[in-house]
Amino acid sequence: MIEDNKRTIKFLEELLAEEKVLDLENYNDQGVKITAHTYDVFNLSINEIKKVYHNLENAKKQLDLFSVVIGIIIHDLSKGTLRKSEDNISHSQIMLKNPEYIIKETENILREIEDKTGFYLKEDVRKNIIHIVVSHHGKWGKVIPSTKEAQLVHWADMYSAKYHRINPIDVNDILKSFERGENLIEIGKKFKCTTGVIKDRLKKSKQELKLGSTKQLLNYFKKNKKVPLGDDFFTRRIVETGKLIKSVEKEGFKKLILKNEVLSVLKDKEIFKN
C-alpha cells in the first residue's frame, strides 16, 4: 500500500463495503446488474481520461479524480434504496423531480464513511462528488453538469446506458427453448427477462434475415443451427454487454475498482482535511 494514499484506499474500501453499495449487486436494470453498469461507467471514464489527458498524472492536474471515482461508485445508489424501500418513484423520476433526495442520500453516505474511518473530506471535494451524482442524467435530470468531472461522468453514464445496458440473452437460446415446446412466459422466467425482450430479440433476427414470421425463423434455426443476433451494430452491443457482465461476475465489482491504476495517483493530502 502506498503511504501517501493510505487513507484514500481505506475510505474506498469502507465505501465499497457499505450496505447500500453492496445492495446494488441485487438489482438489475434491463437485464444488467447495477454494479456491472457502474463498473462500465467507471471503466469508460478512466479510459476517456487517459485518452484526453494522455496519462493519469497529467489528468490529476486538471481533474478531481477522487471525486470522479467516488461519484461513479454511488451515482446510482438510489436505484437500490428506492427499490428496497418499495417506493413508487423510480431513480429517473427522482433525478428529474426531486434531486434534493439524491443530494441528501449522497451527503449521508459520505458522512457515514467519514465517521467510520475518521477521515473527513475537504469541502470542495465533497461538493464535487455531490454535483457529479446529482447531475449525472444531464438534460434528463433537473441538475445539469457544470464541471469537467460531472460532464465526464454524465457522458460515460449515457454511453453505458445506450450501448452496454442490454439484456444479453441470445436469440439462439430462445429458439432452442421454442424447440423444446416452451412458451414466451416460460422462456421469460427461465432467462429472467420480460416477454418484450424475447420478442425484440426475435424481431431483430428476423429483420436481419428478412423473414416475416417467428415460424420461418425457427425453421431457419432448425436447418442452420444458428441465426444472427441482429445487424452488426446490435450484435456488437450485445456481445460487449455480455463481456462486461462476465468480467464483473468473475473479478467482482470491489476488486475491479481497488486494483485500478487511478488509485495510485490519488493523494490523501489533496482529499482529506488535516
Image (cartoon, helix red, strand yellow):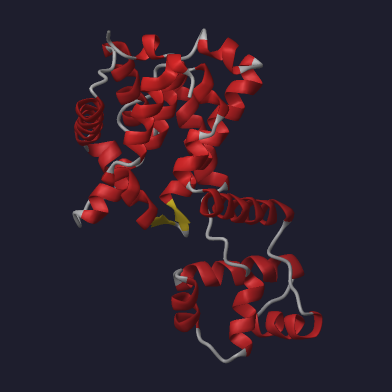
Callout count = 0
- Residue 239, x across and y down, in percent: 66, 55
Q: Identify the residue at image location x=27%, y=46%.
A: 19
The picture quadrant where one finds residue 48 is top right
Q: Nearer the viewer, residue 242 or 234?
A: 242
Left or right: 89, with 14 as reference point: left
Which image quarter is the C terminus in? top left
Q: Is residue 269 above or below residue 35?
A: above
Which residue appears farthest toward the bottom when viewing the image? 181
User: Up-down: is 236 above or below 56?
Assistant: below
Residue 75 seen? no
Between 19 and 152, the residue placed more toward the observer is 19
The structure residue drawn at horizontal position 50% and vertical position 86%, both measured from the top left corner, is 183
**Nearer to the camera, 11 or 219:** 11
Place of residue 72 in the rendered image (x, y in percent of width and height, measured from the top left): 42, 33
- The picture quadrant where one finds residue 50 is top right
Residue 199 visible to an observer of this rendering: yes
Q: In the rendered image of this protein, does residue 207 appear above or below residue 261?
A: below
**Closer to the camera in the image, 228 or 43:** 43
The spot of residue 201 in percent (x, y) is 59, 68
The image position of residue 154, as x and y in percent, is: 45, 30
The answer to whether 183 appears left or right of 235 in the picture is left
Residue 89 lies left or right of residue 249; in this view the side is left
Residue at 52% over, 21% down: 264
Question: Measuring 54% from the left and 72% from the top, which residue is drawn there?
Answer: 199
